[in-house]
Amino acid sequence: MARSRQQPEADREEILECVQQDCPHCNKLMRNKYDNYRTVRTLAGVVRLRLKIRRCYNSECDRFGYTYRPEAEGKWALPQQEFGLDVIALVGMWRYQQHRSVPEIHRQLEQCNICVSERTVSNLLARYDELLAVKLADCERLQAVVAQQQQVILAIDGLQPDMGHEVLWVIRDCLSGEILLAQSLLSATTKDLASLLKQVKQALSVPIIGIVSDGQQSIRKAVATALPQVAHGLCHFHYLREATKLIYEADRHAKKELKKRVRGVRVIERSVTDADNPVTEVVQGYCQAVRAALTDDGCPPLDASGLQLQHRLGMIEQSLERAVQKGGYPNP
Ligand SMILES: [Zn+2]
């Protein structure tokens, strides 16, 4: 059936890279083969994903020519799906925890700026049901996929569409993109998560050679308990985001302290009003430079605004010192 509404335009782009850059079979560095694009409708807007696809170029390798997609793709959406996993998790929560009807869910999605037909809501619910019904141990198709690969790299993600409600935990295989287990849990203790990982490990007939996550404390401990010998990698995006939090906080504090030191700049600016005095222009020039430095924002973590402010105030200070040494009017 033809689509009755056009897919909305993406409002931002996310670039996803492979965390595992060496071929999992021959351990040789894989090169970027091409970029693949897909658009996903999430609760936070429409996102265009730019996926950096890698390929094994080692002609001696069993997997020569195989392509690998970024591990984080599966956290955004299921394969071939237009809607993000977060939307599916939310729809499932409304239906099964809050017992809302399809028309009610339809209206609520519209309030989240996700305008779809009621039929799409039913489809989303079907995807949610399928997700929770995945049983690796009983699924011949999944067993055949992982057996052919001879190994898996897991990814574990928790999707919490609403604070205080259940979290939908999804464990995927990054090499095939297949979901191996999905379960909704009210609490996510180390013990709960370790139990999920153990279920997957027991159902697998091939070794787990690595696991990727956002590195939150309970996941780290669960991996250490359930998969002690398995290498645990952090998704680049989450890694940078976590690092950003610390840098952002430290930088914000530094900027606040620096601002306190130049708080009197407006008083000085207002105190010089004599247009005939040449000092007036010079003082106002410096005051403007200080004010401009205060309002200039950076972009943490790589271009921190506190550090930028310190640099600019330092330049103004040096200029003033040079002026004092000359014994005349400062020359910025
Ligand atoms: Zn290879």
Image (cartoon, rainbow, N blue to C red):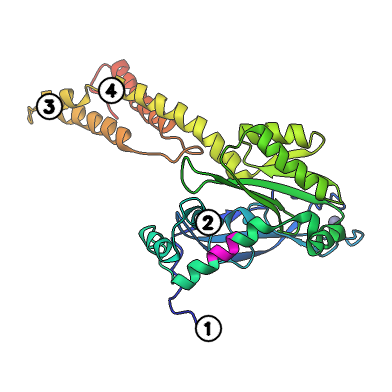
Q: Please tell me the numbered disc located at residue 92.
A: 2
Discs 1/4, front: 1
Q: Give how far across and how far down residue 234 sits, in percent.
A: 66, 41
Q: Which quadrant of the render holds ligand 1?
A: bottom right
Amino acid residing under circle 3: Arg
Amino acid residing under circle 4: Val
Residue topped by disc 4: 262
Q: Secondary structure at mark 4?
A: loop
Residue topped by disc 1: 1
Asked whether mark 2 lies closer than 8 Å to ligand 1, one says no
Discs 2/3, front: 2
* Alpha carbons under labels 1 and 4: distance apart: 65 Å
Which of marks 4 and 2 precedes in the sequence? 2
Residue 92 left/right relative to 75: left
Which of marks 1 and 2 precedes in the sequence? 1
Q: Is residue 157 above or below residue 225?
A: below
Amino acid residing under circle 2: Gly
Q: Please tell me the numbered disc located at residue 270.
A: 3
Amino acid residing under circle 1: Met
Image-quadrant location for residue 210: top right
What residue is rendered at 77% in x and 55% in y? 136
Write down the region rendered in magenta: 124-128
Pick the residue in front: 45 or 90: 90
* Alpha carbons under labels 2 and 3: distance apart: 61 Å
What residue is rendered at 18% in x and 27% in y? 266
Q: Give how far across and how far down residue 218 sits, in percent.
A: 63, 33
Pick the residue in front: 286 or 219: 219
Which of marks 3 and 2 precedes in the sequence? 2
Which of marks 4 and 1 precedes in the sequence? 1
